[in-house]
Amino acid sequence: MLDSDSIQNRFHRFSLPSIVRLQVLIFSFAIGFSFFHCQLEKISEPPSVISLPPESNQPLPSSERLEWQKIKETVWIHRSFGTFGGKVYSANGLVVLSNKGAVVIDTPWTESQTEELFSAIQTKFQKEILFLIVTHAHDDRMAGVPLFQKRNIPVYSTSLTAKLAKERGFGKTNPILDIQTRFAMGNESIEVFFPGHGHSADNIVVWLAQTHILFGSCLVKALDAENLGNVKEADLNEWPNSVKRVLSRYPDAEVVVPGHGDWGKLDLLRHTIRLLVSPNH
Ligand SMILES: [Zn+2]
């Protein structure tokens, strides 16, 4: 847990036209920037593929309906389903509820499930959506972005994800996220952290300081994952180091949510490292 006073002092504040007050902390300024730019240079030729293989190897029974899992009163998983190779797989995103409105982390895998997400947030939670954060430029994270744009809901990403998303036809995002960015919305705060290349060059994780929930997205594998899934854009050497950075940054995480499969505790991070260092992956 970070000391809130020191965070407060280190924050560089600026305001957005929306009701959201955004606080940005640029962490390890010079080192952070050069690190991030290294990552940018690494993917000079990103693949043009839009539909990517799933990150879990466990196909599920066919279902196109969005599912909800409650972690805490204010934090819910939206679980969507996508088809790859004739099989259906699930993907996890989050909805964080504050007294100012809802924040969505990653869109469902399809546009129709994104429509379901909108109506559920309205009816189930009675909240307006403040903004969307996307954790990397893959379709299980961004397929619904055009629908957010249609509703004029801000979509935030890192600059690398914005660049890749544009090339892949996922729509335009606002690239305000840095190595570490923190948003304060009323009684909740959301921290975004880029730990380095893992599943993809642009993968970020999201930390909810109030509830100690870590959304690992596709950087983190579920405990029952027996392999790394889609490694098309992965850096298998750097991935364990990136997971270790997440582990040492959020040692007090109580819940860890992977990109696919069931949520658990910090052992999901250690399991991901084991998969990476095992010779059988
Ligand atoms: Zn992915």
Image: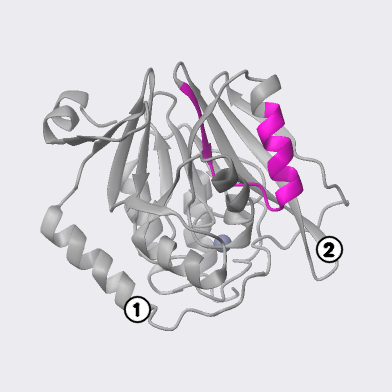
Q: Position of residue 48 (x, y in %)?
A: 56, 79
Q: Residues within 10 Å of mark 2 (few under 14, many from 20)?
A: some
Q: Residues within 10 Å of mark 1 (few under 14, many from 20)?
A: few
- Badge 1 marks a residue whose secondary structure is helix
- Residue identifier under label 2: 87
Nearest to the observer: residue 257 or residue 149:
149
Q: Position of residue 257 (x, y in %)?
A: 55, 42
Residue 114, quarter of the rendered image: top right
- Identify which amino acid the numbered label 2 is placed on: Lys
Q: Position of residue 154 (x, y in %)?
A: 46, 42
Q: Are marks 1 and 2 in contact (CB under 8 Å)?
A: no
The boundaries of the magenta stretch are: 101-120
Residue 57, quarter of the rendered image: bottom right
Can the viewer see residue 229?
Answer: yes
Q: Quadrant of the N terminus?
A: top left
Q: CA distance from mark 1 to mark 2?
A: 32 Å
Can the viewer see residue 199?
Answer: no
Could you tell me which residue is drawn at 56 percent across and 37 percent down?
94
The question of residue 119 being in magenta is answered with yes
Q: Quadrant of ligand 1?
A: bottom right
- Badge 2 marks a residue whose secondary structure is strand
Q: Quadrant of the C terminus?
A: bottom right
- Residue identifier under label 1: 42
Whichever of labels 1 and 2 marks the residue nearer the N terminus, that label is: 1
275 horizontally vs 17: left or right: right
